[in-house]
Amino acid sequence: MINNTSKRGAVVSLGMFDGVHMGHRALLNTSLNIARENDLESIVYTFIDHPMKVLGKSPKLLMTFKERFDSMKALGLDKVDAVHFDRELASMEPLDFIKMLLSRYPVKFIVAGFNYSFGRYGTGDCDCLTRFGRELGIGVQIIPPVIYNGSSVSSTRIRESLENGQLEEANKMLQSRYTLSGKVVSNRRIGTRIGFPTANITPPQEKMLPRSGVYAAVAHVENGTHYYAVTNIGKNPTFQGSHTTIESHLIDFSGDIYDKHMSIALYRRIRDEIKFPDAEALARQISKDKNTVQQYFNMVN
């Protein structure tokens, strides 16, 4: 989103960086090191929307664009330049794509991941990028895969971990807590009726939801306060719910936070979502869940 660059030269990192996971961080930290050693700007060239939104069916995203932008800037990068991926970019020949980057920035180095592809039909790969670098007098650094538990870390693998309920594995690869955010909205107030009021959020439609179940979480409210929380992600089968909701009971909280922005950082998945015979049985289980969450945070703290 920032186009004005210094003329001293730049290191340009290429990628979508969904999740800003440990593989992405290895790439971006390499860019930062090259920039510092050579007195260059560190710039990320990325896309606001996933390219597959134009080319086909886009996967659910680990991060919204704002979350991704903020996470990359927090690493210390000078600029994050994000553009809309469109048909014109999709049809660009690989060499033309690189020449476009050269016209956009004073490129001295390009850094990309081992599986990066670019240009028409993704025909530009890392070998192609390295060859163009030699021909155009640009340094090219290709980052090898980062291995966790025997396999390469990738956004796809993290999505699969979340789908399978393996939250802690996903968090380790993300090097952060998987987070869902949105404005607190009104609900059926079932939680209030059974003694456990909840704050409900609706994340953006493109955001990846983890497997349904009950989670130990920390709720961060826009006024700067945070609370331990019992978060349920699911369809609330005890009350014949028809769509997925994200409901969080904030421990030791009383008050009104409707219309406030809230982020839920998920720490541990503690159980599956269950259909209970009645509201009383559900209330008893939530009380147990609350104790489990409190014990978990007492242990990790």
Image (cartoon, rainbow, N blue to C red):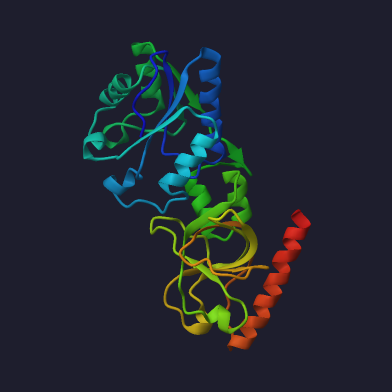
Residue drawn where x is 61% and y is 56% of the image: 225
Q: Position of residue 87 (x, y in %)?
A: 22, 40
Q: Position of residue 34 (x, y in %)?
A: 52, 19
Residue drawn where x is 71% and y is 75% of the image: 288
Q: Judge from the rendering whether residue 18 lies leftward or rightward of residue 171; answer left or right.
A: left
The relative height of residue 290 versus residue 162 in the rendered view (above or below) is below
The relative height of residue 161 versus residue 99 in the rendered view (above or below) is below
The relative height of residue 186 versus residue 53 in the rendered view (above or below) is below
User: Which of the pair 234/198 is nearer the observer?
Assistant: 198
Q: Position of residue 270 (x, y in %)?
A: 65, 66
| The quadrant where residue 226 appears | bottom right
Residue 269 seen in the figure: no
The relative height of residue 100 versus residue 260 in the rendered view (above or below) is above
User: Which of the pair 189/180 is nearer the observer?
Assistant: 189
Residue drawn where x is 41% and y is 45% of the image: 65
User: Which of the pair 6/240 is nearer the observer?
Assistant: 6
Q: Quadrant of the N terminus?
A: top left
Residue 12 seen in the figure: yes
Q: Judge from the rendering whether residue 290 lies leftward or rightward of residue 143; answer left or right.
A: right
Residue drawn where x is 45% and y is 70% of the image: 244
